[in-house]
Amino acid sequence: MLLGGVIRPVPKLKLLLLGPPQVLLSDSSVTFDTRKATALLAYLAVNGHPQRRETLASLFWPEADESRARAALRRTLSVLGKGLSGEWLQAERETIQLGRRGELSLDVDSFRLLLGAPRNDAHPPDEVCDRCLPSLEEAADLYRGDFLAGFTLRDAPEFDEWQFFQAEALRAELAGALANLAQGYAAHAQWERAIGHGRRWLALDPLDEAAHRMLMRLYAWSNQRTAALRQYQRCADILDEELGVPPSPETRALKEAIEAGRAPSLNGAAPHADKAGERGERSPLIREAGLRRPLKRSPGPERRSISARRLPAHLPLVGREKEWKELVQAYEAADVHGQLVVIEGEAGIGKTRLAQEFMTRAVDEGAVALSARCYPGELNLSYGPFIQMLQRALLPTTDSSGAGPPWLREAPPHSLSETARLLPEMRAFIPDLPQAAPLEGPGAQARFFEGVRLTLVHATRAGRPAVLFFDDLHEADEASQELLRYLLHRLTDWPVLLLSAWRSEGVPAYHPLRTMLAEASRSDSAEHLPLGPLNEGDVASLVASLRLDEDLPVADLIGRLHRESEGLPFYLVEYLETVVSKEGDLLHGEWQMPRGVQDLIRSRVAALSENQRQLLSAASVIGRYFDHDALRAATGRDDEQFLSELEGLLQVGVIAEQGTQETSQLRYDFRHDKLREFVYQQTSLARRRLLHRRVAEDLLGGIPTPNLPDAAAGTVARHFFHAGERTRAAEFFLLAGDHARGVYANAQALTDYRAALDLGHPDPAALHERIGDLLVLQGDYAAAQESYDAALSGSPQDPARLRHKLGSLHQRRGAWQLAEANFHAALEGDAKPVSAGQQARVYADWSLTAHLQGNSAQAQDYAKRAMALAQAAGEAAPLAQAHNLLGILARGRQDVDAARRHLEESLALAKKLGDPVAQIAALNNLALVAQASGDAQRGLDLLRSALGLCESIGDRHRAAALYSNLADLLRAAGRSDEAMQELKRSAAILSQIDAKDGVWQPEIWKLVEW
């Protein structure tokens, strides 16, 4: 680069992605304002080739609409460019790549280059020679940690998946290198170094029996027989502790051989064969984020910040207008007759907050309000909440004489004597208070209860009804419940609101407290206020009270807060505290679960028995929703034990039952997804694997793979994936992709196919072909060509079909010579004869290519060949295509009747076949015939039918052509405004099709018929 006439060298860029990401520019550390910038840099560096802006926008901002995602990408590129001093980043109009000018060092590339060095030696890849060891050592030293360790973008699941697959692959490569190093140094009797590498291999996955066996052999070969047997015991212990299974027969056989003094010889052990057969059998488990489909949410800018601060000390009460009104009504009624109000709900729903707000209002109006909280673990502390209330009633004093509050001098002495049983410190204010009679005889308890009641009546006497609040009443001791029931039966002349709050899970259906509430309700002296979660409008009201920065996308923030908190007020406040107390990516960044939320959930889970926690772990692996049979299969419990533990979880309210007597399917779900997330994270990796594998096997249930229900394939794939069963996961990801493709869920199908490919599916050619097909529909023709080329290089089953697809792809791009070359290659057949039906389809497409070039004679000749071959084959699909081409050519000759006849025949065949692609082509061409015949309305109807089909299958290029044709018909009909709208739709799509370096291929814009 020139600067003042002097050539300025491009600075050296060093990227360290093995371990926590580090960026060094000319040996100086570089940091970026957003995690997205770091993630984007890593993605560009590892992939190497140019990436389409559209692809990057959807990858990093999947839940934003296209325009906002692209805007977010531009801002992130700006951040990245500034951090790299304006160098390295090559951003074109439609593509972005990390330039290779100057000196770029990427540790991932170096790691793999060093691992590849041994392959140049003349021995099998799994064997090790002396020349291999230095490069393998250097590679192992270069591996500081897992790929992007500790780094994640929880709001970009596809990036998370890509990161995971990269990490898994690199980790597996490291395992192979360490195994080879252990083997290589063992061959030279360098036992310390061999054992060190063996231990590091085992540390990658302590459940990998192949690594355990390698260490056992190394110890045996180095005359450390005791250490070898100890290694076996460690293997057995960890397998039993984590998975509940014994070591495999191979491991047990090796142990027995070592015990008998006949361990395999160093030369005959072939340790590489052992690891080749088993390495990866328990590959590391995926992070919790895992594979998941992105959730749609409101679009918004990529990054906004607000000033670092804290939440106000007192937030407004929102979302409780109905309950507040009912509280006020009950309070007014208490002036005539005492009332009971029960506020019910789960932990964190806001019961205490509502009660406290109401008590503050009552005190402001001149009432006396006393409160007490019942605590778990104090069931043996009789009358605990009443003691708390009475102690608070003693606090206010009116003078310095030590006589205590005035109500003590007004209350009857006998009631104070009875109350002094609970509160002996009362005697300090009234020294001559007589002693109460012993609690003996039939009327003793009634005298005691009445004495406490009268004391409370005098302690709370004021101009307004009193409020006595019992918080967490479900934790109250039995004696307190009896005393409260006594008070409820004597409210006639006492203006008091007995306000209480209890957790739903703590008061089951037949609990005495529910009986008490029912009795009071029958006498019209009770109100039940069950609290539900806040809605999004309530969250909006709360956020509005905070007066956040004016440029903050509040609507998007509200939506995310509601989703994260699920409307639970306690969760909402905790997340709000996190949001307002720091700057950051509020909409798309990772939101860690707040500590307060974790503590609340932890306390609920800790109260469960060990068996219940195991059951809950299994449920968290299945997902938010689960059924009885799936959970039972995952846990392996017998019916009686399982039902007992399940009912226990239902009773404490961590899960809920869904379904009625009339429904055949009974389901359960977690009360909150945060609870499921927490339990899943707290479950050990080994247990997760085991549970995921069990769930996958249960979902299969002996069903042959081809007969697996469509919705189940993806679920099975993900469970096998989480279980570390890479091969089986790949199999089912392929099946899931086929199912998704069958219903034109193209984005999901692409995700599934790529997952199968990254997991090492044994038929990569088939996957590359499927991926290419979907990329064609997306209009990403360059990437589609790469996929088809990869399929061709991978020994495909039908190379002629792939050549035909490549020819059709080049036809779409207007690359006529390449199209014809591939059509010619498809007809020759590289490996096997090409059927007449397939030849017919190739000739039909070749005919279209000739027609588009203006070569009418060749087009007619190939179309006739296509018709003859299709008729000879007796196949409807090529026959429909041949009729379509003959119709196109007839319209070109202005033979409208012949064109209509051929196209209607093509459409009829396509409908019979249920082939939407052929139907779209015939409908479009029939619309053009209708236009030529002056029947504009029929043409419009046909085009709209074609558009509906085209958008359903996701063919973007042809959809754009249909919009353009629709605009032509509307313009011809004098409907210019509508025509302009359709033309804009067409241009918007076409501008994104097959753009290369900001330049569009002209033929892309000319598509009219096909």
Image (cartoon, helix red, strand yellow):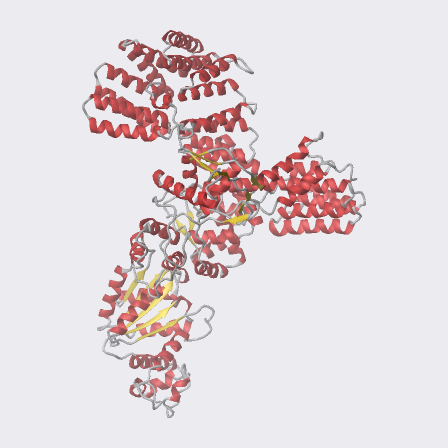
Residue furthest front in the image: 5
Left/right placement of residue 731 relative to residue 91 reads: right
- Residue 466 in percent (x, y) is at 28, 75
Q: Where is the C terminus found, in terms of image quarters?
A: top left
The answer to whether residue 720 is visible is: no
Q: Residue at image x 46%, y 56%?
A: 649
Q: Quadrant of residue 381?
A: bottom left
Q: Visible in this render: residue 522?
A: yes
Say which residue appears at 29% left-offset and 76% top-offset: 368
- Residue 689 is situated, as x and y percent measured from the top left of the image, at 56, 46
Question: Vertically, is 9 above or below 35?
Answer: above
Toward the left, the furthest residue is: 974
Q: Front-most of 775 and 817?
A: 817
**782 vs 686: above or below:** above
Residue placed most toward the observer, 945 or 754: 754
Residue 690, position in %: x, y?
Answer: 56, 46
Relative vertical location of residue 126 with respect to residue 516 in this rendering, above or below: above
- Residue 714 lies, in percent from the top left, at 47, 37
Q: How many marks?
A: 0
Residue 72 quadrant? top left
